[in-house]
């Protein structure tokens, strides 16, 4: 009931389009690569970090332990993917690791609306699925100062919670390691832009 009216309307509209909701609880190496290509097209358009070798290796390890869930929404024939959401889960909590939309569809007026509906429908289906699996907390990722992203995420209800993440260095070696890490990440991001 906390989902805003416009989101509910788009979810109902998507239900009528017979979109395919796909869940991969143990994504294979080829499915990881397929996602990586999809995500990196999205990341290039959004000017954000790409999904690289390190990220794929991390997801492989999470998948091996049963803590990675891929979900996506596709057309009726499953030939065109609208959007992905990738979660890390421990059974009690599911946290969004990646979300990406089909960048090509955003350029066409007719499919731009479909993409919006598919995204909302995917989140809704995931909410239902995780609830049925006993997940108590569904973390949609950080709220940003970007008004459209903030509105999108808060439009699904829930509660905003402050969560801290990152690294604290307590030794000289640790501090040097963080400096080096930040420099490497900065170079990596500039290279990807």
Image: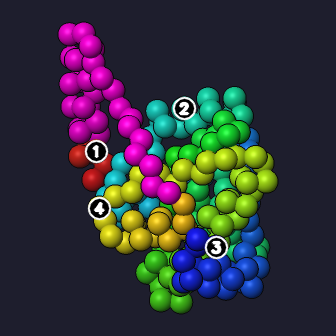
Q: Is residue 109 above or below residue 145?
A: below
Name the spot of residue 31 as percent of width and height, x first: 66, 48
Q: Which residue is under mark 1?
A: 189
Name the spot of residue 75 as percent of width and height, x first: 70, 74
The residue mark sitting in front, 3 or 2, is 3
Distance of label 3 from label 2 (alpha carbons): 39 Å
First in residue order: circle 4 vs circle 1 = 4
Name the spot of residue 52 as percent of width and height, x first: 44, 40
Magenta span contains residue 109: no
State the residue in front, 192 or 121: 121
First in residue order: circle 4 vs circle 2 = 2
Q: Which residues are magenta?
A: 159-188
Label 3: element kind: loop
Q: Which residue is under mark 4?
A: 145
State the residue in front, 4 or 90: 4
Name the spot of residue 1 as percent of width and height, x first: 64, 73
Q: Which residue is under mark 2?
A: 57
Q: Which residue is under mark 3?
A: 1
First in residue order: circle 1 vs circle 2 = 2
Relative to residue 51, is residue 116 drawn left or right? Answer: right
Distance of label 1 from label 3 (alpha carbons): 40 Å
State the residue in front, 137 or 27: 137
């Amino acid at each position: 009931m906390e989902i805003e009216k416009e989101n509910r309307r788009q979810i109902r509209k998507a239900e009528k389009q017979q979109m395919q909701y796909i869940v991969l609880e143990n994504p294979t190496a080829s499915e990881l690569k397929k996602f990586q290509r999809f995500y990196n097209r999205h990341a290039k358009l959004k000017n954000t970090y790409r999904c690289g070798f390190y990220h794929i290796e991390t997801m492989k390890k999470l998948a091996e332990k049963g803590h990675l869930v891929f979900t996506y929404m596709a057309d009726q024939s499953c030939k065109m993917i609208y959007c992905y959401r990738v979660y890390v889960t421990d059974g009690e909590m599911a946290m969004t690791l990646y979300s990406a939309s089909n960048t090509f569809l955003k350029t066409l007026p007719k499919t731009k609306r479909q993409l919006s509906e598919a995204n909302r429908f995917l989140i809704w289906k995931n909410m239902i699925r995780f609830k049925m699996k006993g997940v108590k907390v569904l973390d949609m990722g950080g709220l940003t100062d970007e008004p459209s992203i903030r509105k999108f995420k808060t439009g699904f209800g829930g509660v905003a919670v402050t969560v801290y993440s990152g690294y604290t260095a307590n030794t000289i070696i640790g501090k040097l390691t963080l400096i080096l890490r930040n420099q490497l990440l900065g170079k990596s991001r500039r290279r990807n832009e």
